[in-house]
Image: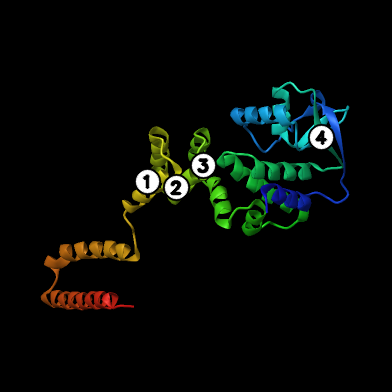
Amino acid sequence: MSGTNRADKVVSLFLTSSTGSQVKELPLGKVNPRTNQPRKTFNDKKIGELAESIRERGVLQPIRVRPNGSGMYEIIAGERRWRACNLIGLKTIPAVITEGVKDIEVMAEALIENIQREDLVAFEKAMAIKEMIECQLALTGKKMTLEAAGKMLGLTRQRVCQYLGILKLPEHILEKFCQSDLNEMHARALIMLRGLIELQEKLIDDIETMGLSGQQAIEWAQQYLSDVPVKTSVHNLVSKSDKQMNKLKKDWPNMTAQQQIACRKELGELQKRIQNTLNELKKPE
């Protein structure tokens, strides 16, 4: 199934059947973008490429708009095409005029179009997926599963998780991440170091200063993790034992002969138990 078909399928799930529409050539000056457009930035180079395509072939797919009062229209989907038409000085643009669309439905369609058709930066795509899930909840009262979101967008559940994981980064790390325009592989590397704030800060600084690719960042994160001491239940046991042993050595000179004999016996039993445990652990599964 093509990306466009997937987008149409998803949009049909969000938009109500009572919505009416018509196609019309609208003056560009009467069309405005939405103020809460999910996409925050646009790639000027790609807008330019689209503009040249439109100059040669025209607008192949109408934008979608809704009336916004006083003869004006608000873009639901197709802001890139609108920008490209403005860039080459066109006077009108073909548009599907959709009546009776709720704000939440407008948001849903814009999100789907952006996720499917735009090269959003990783953070924007993460926000769009999050907002799409919230839109589904607002429209139907049911929470969308990650599997369902992935199926709708042509992404695996793992990819959806990776995108959403970006939003779980510490705020100051996330700010650097956004400013550096990094991708989801960079985010995956940072998430691998979850809970290790100093290492996350070090990694994102290395990414910026050394220009690490996403794959390189993952490899560096793996190396960072290999250098982190691993604490286990045995570590805690040894730590407690060290304290007890130090206390024993301190108290030893003041013990009676009978107490010293008892301590030696108990230490001998402890030694046997440790050795037996080591022998058990060496046995094949």
Compare marks 3 and 4 and give the one earlier in the sequence: 4
Residue 94 found in image quarter? top right
Residue 172 is situated, as x and y percent measured from the top left of the image, at 49, 38
- Mark 4 crowd level (few <14, some 14–19, many ≥20, 10 Å Cα): many
Disc 1 residue type (three-letter): Trp
Disc 1 marks which residue? 220
Residue at 73% in and 27% down = 85
**Which residue is drawn at the image coordinates 73% and 30% (left, top)?**
82
Residue named by callout 3: 183
- N-terminal of the two: label 4 or label 2? 4
Mark 3: amino acid: Asn
Using the image as rendered, state which of residue 48 and residue 30 is in the foreground.
Answer: 48
Which of the 4 image quadrants contains residue 96?
A: top right
Relative image position of residue 146 (x, y in whole percent): 62, 56
> Label 4 is placed on what type of residue?
Ala
Mark 4, secondary structure of its residue: strand
Tell me the element at label 3: loop
Q: Is residue 83 visible?
A: no
Quarter of the C terminus within the rendering: bottom left
In whole angstroms, how far apart are the C-alphas of marks 4 and 1? 49 Å
Q: Label 2: which residue? A: 189
CB of mark 2 within 8 Å of CB of mark 1? yes
Cα–Cα gap, marks 2 and 1: 8 Å
> Mark 1 to mark 3: distance in Å?
16 Å
Q: Pick the quarter of the image with the N terminus.
A: bottom right
Label 1: how many Cα within 10 Å (few below 14, some 14–19, many 20+): some
